[in-house]
Image: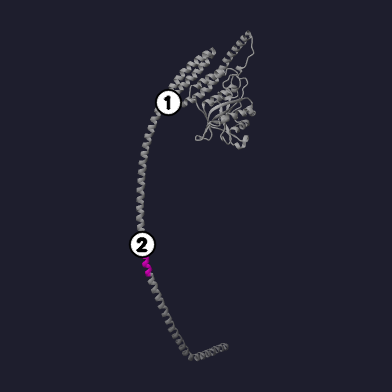
Amino acid sequence: ATEGEVTVQYEPFRKIISHTLRFANESKEEKQQVFGICIGEYLKDEKRYIVKNAIPITHGDDIEIGWSEEMHNTIESIKSDYKDGNDTVIGWYHSHLGYGLYFSNADKANNLYFQNSDNLYGFGILIEQSKLKEAKDFGVDVYRIKDVSKGVDSDYVKVKFEIEPPNSMQFFKWVQELVESTQEKNAKLIYEVNELSKPTPEVLQEIPTSDKEHSKIKEERELTLLYGVNDGMDKLTESFIKTYEQQLTSWMEIISEDVLKGSEYIRSSINNIKITLSSGLEDAQRIFDRIFSEISSLFMKNVRASVDIRLENQVELKESIEADTEEQLHNLFNRLENEMRNVTNYFEEKFSNIKKDLERVVQKNKSILESLNQNNELLNAVYEASDKLAENVIQNIKNSSANFQTKLFNELEDFSNAMKPNEETFDELEEMIERLQKTISDLRQIK
């Protein structure tokens, strides 16, 4: 749930509507705003406020201009009365007269009194009097300040709320009283808190009049009241028929289809009231009481039957759900067991194959290691034989080189000695060749 949601119980909602209609109804020439405070508690687990009571405080333009010292003292006194219990002042309500559902700067300033560090989600209930018969929620919205630290400069937000339906026949009796009471211009549907401590006009002494004047005034009052009743009843009952037809239908749908029958009777009875009002309030009262008694009996009978049927259906549904759940769990466990068995077998087979592969690899590595060891021994033997052969070759080369060198030097020396006698012969041949060449040259010149 969203933090700070608001649930308005039937009784405080009835008081808020009564307070609003007392100072702004069809018979009022000059309509006025109203102001009151909401009493209740904040349920931390459910994150919501429960409005259990509404206390009317005042009416008039002071609501928009600012609180008087008397208003402030009255509110503080009420807060003091509730300080020791679970219930306390949690918010406020006020009405608008045809200029829409929104929080004005004055509304923001008023709300800051209720929304603070001790009551983080303090709220204001706003009733637009002109929308009472148009909107399904009686032209009601709930608001609070978005950021308290910014004061009246902060934006405001709409708060999710619900209005609890009535849980007894007293609601319909209140509708009847409301219709009858609002025909007088100064009808007291509900008293404001300060009126309860002041004398009412009825207890004030009247100026005596003569019997003739008294009779004339009485006739004028009766005629005025009769015309006012006829005219006002037509307008107000039409308004209430539209408003409560929407709201009652919504509430009856929540209970059951059987209860809709009672709702139809209620709407029918209200229409009958409208038709018979012209014949006098006494006849209307009699018809309303009779029809209301029949509807109450039928309504309670249908409610009991509906509740019994719903209880039986709930028991059957519970048993069906338990059986289905048990069967589904059993099937689920079987599937899980089979899946686990298949997975286990699969992994066991894979692990077995891996183990065999590892054993083959180990055996192969062992063979390779043995071959490497044998090759190492063979290479060592080859290296030793190569070293010995190289030493022998080097020694033989050394020995052969020394003998060959000595022999070569000796042969060269012998050859040199043998060639010495031929050197003189070569010299003589060269001298003969030179003379021969010279002779040839001379012969060429003779030619």
Residue nearest the viewer, comparing 51 with 274: 51
Q: Quadrant of the C terminus?
A: bottom right
Mark 1 to mark 2 CA distance (whole Å): 85 Å
> Badge 1 is on which residue?
307
Residue 170 horizontal/vertical position (percent): 50, 21
Locate residue 431 relative to residue 105 in the image: left or right. left
Residue 239 horizontal/vertical position (percent): 55, 21
Q: Amino acid type of disc 2?
A: Lys
Question: In which image quadrant can residue 143 be found?
Answer: top right
Name the residue located 60 percent from the left edge and 11 percent from the top edge.
Answer: 218
Question: In which image quadrant can residue 138 be found?
Answer: top right
Locate residue 40 relative to residue 205 in the image: left or right. left
Name the residue located 59 percent from the left edge and 14 percent from the top edge.
Answer: 225
Q: What range of the chain is rendered magenta?
A: 365-378
Q: In terms of sequence position, does the residue under pointer 1 or pointer 2 come before the other? A: 1
Residue nearest the viewer, comparing 364 with 86: 86
Name the residue located 58 percent from the left edge and 88 percent from the top edge.
Answer: 445
Describe the element under mark 2 as helix, strand or loop.
helix
Report the predominant secondary structure element of the magenta stretch. helix
In magenta segment, residue 370? yes
Q: Amino acid type of disc 1?
A: Val
> Badge 2 is on which residue?
366
Residue 284 horizontal/vertical position (percent): 52, 14
Residue nearest the viewer, comparing 206 with 248: 206
Describe the element under mark 1 as helix, strand or loop.
helix
Asked whether residue 237 is in view, the answer is no
In magenta segment, residue 162? no
Residue 419 horizontal/vertical position (percent): 47, 89
